[in-house]
Image (cartoon, rainbow, N blue to C red):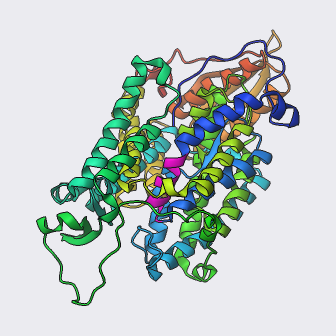
Amino acid sequence: MSATETKTIEGDLDPPVGNATGFAKFFASDIVSGFLVFLIALPLCLAIALAYGYPPIAGIFTAVVGGILTTFISDSELTIKGPAAGLILIAVGCVRDFGGTGVYDVNNPIAVKAYRAALAVGVVAGVIQILFGVFRVGVVGEYFPLTIVHGMLAAIGVIIIAKQVPPTLGVDASGEPIPLLLGIPKVMANYHAEIAIVGVTSLLIMFLWPLVTKQIKSLRAIPAALIVLVVAIPLGRVLDLSTVTTHKVKLEAHEEHAAAPHAEQAEQPEAPPAAAAPEPNALIKVPPFGETFSAITLPDFSALTMPKAWWWVAMFALIGTLESMLTAKAMDMIDPYQRKTNLDRDNLAVGIANTICAFIGAAPMISEIARSKANVDNGAKTRFADMWHGVFLIACVALLPFVLVMIPKAALSAMLIYTGVRLAHPHEFKHMWEVGPEQLFLFVATIIGVLATDLLIGIGIGILLKYMLEMRRGADFPTLFVPHVSQVDSADGAVVLKATDALTFSNWISLKKRLDRLRQANNNVSVDLSATKLVDHTVMSKLYEQKRFFGQQNLNFDWTGLDNHKAVSDHPQAARIRK
């Protein structure tokens, strides 16, 4: 979840604040940015909700609640709240575990029941997120090693690609990530020509539009997703996608469905003679004009009596909170006014919004990185840009449903493939290698662990391997959790913290709390690392982050004593091991 740094605004003693004064003062910049983010969010909210196994309108409801409600609770000035690709694996996994296929169909009682069970899970997960905020556990987000988090996100990207290739080509598929990946060649062999034309065209636009905007800067304000809709909607009408249905095709270990007009190319399963003809499903469905809120769906709380529900509660609460905090921190780093989000207050806001969303049939939300970054680039000043994006979304779905029902599902799937490629981009692998070969090993191991099991187990595998690596490098087991740091005052009045043994991701929180207290007391700080056996990559990265935080308050922060340590690579944030 990296973001490009933007230039900070120096000397501004009064940074914009999302209060009544800020609403009036920055009305123009916030409403413009909110509108531009709305253009990005509209198709993505629909696409992500479909990928969750929820009705498309659920994604819009999520962004509306997230955008409007959290504006008045969170103090995060630049993040955009809404459904996110990072939760697809959890959401669709939950729906499937309760009997759904991962494809929502209002006429299928099993699909509806699975969706309502997932909503019940979402209510409890939202309450837990509220408790995270109330009991101030935001600092726990500092515990996770950076490499493991990036590995988790890359694995999510791979899974998104695997799950969205079939619908992009006119094939509905369900299954575990690895079988889906292995089944892609057969999916491609059973493509539906008309749907594939729309899907592949949309995919090309998503990848080529950024190259166009690099050459023609005046087009940068137009998001690629909007261009996809402008092209895909009329193309779908020309190809008459409103008449396309799906047909089951059995492929090895899992079932897939190829669009009916192309089904003769694949083996046909036997069907009962009296079976009703399937409805066309190549286009999305939303409530008609005047019936927007008829889509509100209540949770089925009886699902919570099943033990498996609580596994998904933990997944939603933990992974959703972690991703939200990572986004908020990333936005703080690129905020031109250097404002800092209270992560506990933001967790509270997200938890309240998620609880309400689940009660009304909306999808789970987080602070979403791509839309938040676009918000910064569009010149947003305060959190009211998030509110405006929510207002525009509800207005669009209420007033223009006849346009939304012309959107091909294949176009939305293409957008998600692009998102998946960005999460699992080859540059991520290259970056990990540059930081150190061991980081690439942990990164790949986490990806494989997530693909072969699930998110929490995959993350656990990565963290366990990280512990083993640290101990192999000389860290004593007790010091992995409690750092040995003593404090002395230097002659120039700065506070010197002398660390011994090992500084690693798992004992960083204790050191961070001490640094935060010293910074709040306006102390200059130097950390003496000469007596350490090991300083891992996560801690090196956090030290650079602390240097930025201290600098924002015109304080000095540095570290010394690494002359007798060997860096595992030439990267400035590479792990250091004592020679």
* Residue visible at 71% across and 32% down in the picture: 30
| Quadrant in which residue 224 is drawn | top left
**x then y, percent, for residue 173:** 30, 64
Q: Is residue 300 visible?
A: yes
Of 412 and 519, which appears nearest the observer? 412
Name the image quarter holding the C terminus.
top left
**Percent from the top left, x then y, of residue 576?**
49, 26
Q: Is residue 204 left or right of residue 67?
A: left
Asked which quadrant contains residue 449, the reply is bottom left
The image quadrant that residue 58 belongs to is bottom right
Q: Is residue 536 in view from this perspective?
A: no
Residue under the point 47% across and 24% down: 219
- Position of 495 with respect to 149 (left or right) is right
Residue 58 against residue 31 in the figure, above or below: below
The answer to whether 14 is drawn above or below residue 164 in the figure is: above
Q: Residue furthest top?
A: 492
557 falls in the magenta region: no
Q: Residue at x 43, y 78 (%)?
A: 99
Span highlighted in magenta in the image: 42-53
Q: How many marks?
A: 0
Residue 139 lies left or right of residue 432; in this view the side is right
Q: Position of residue 315 (x, y in %)?
A: 55, 61
Instruction: Report the magenta stretch's main SS.
Output: helix
| Residue 59 position within the rendered picture, expressed as x and y whole percent measured from the top left | 56, 57
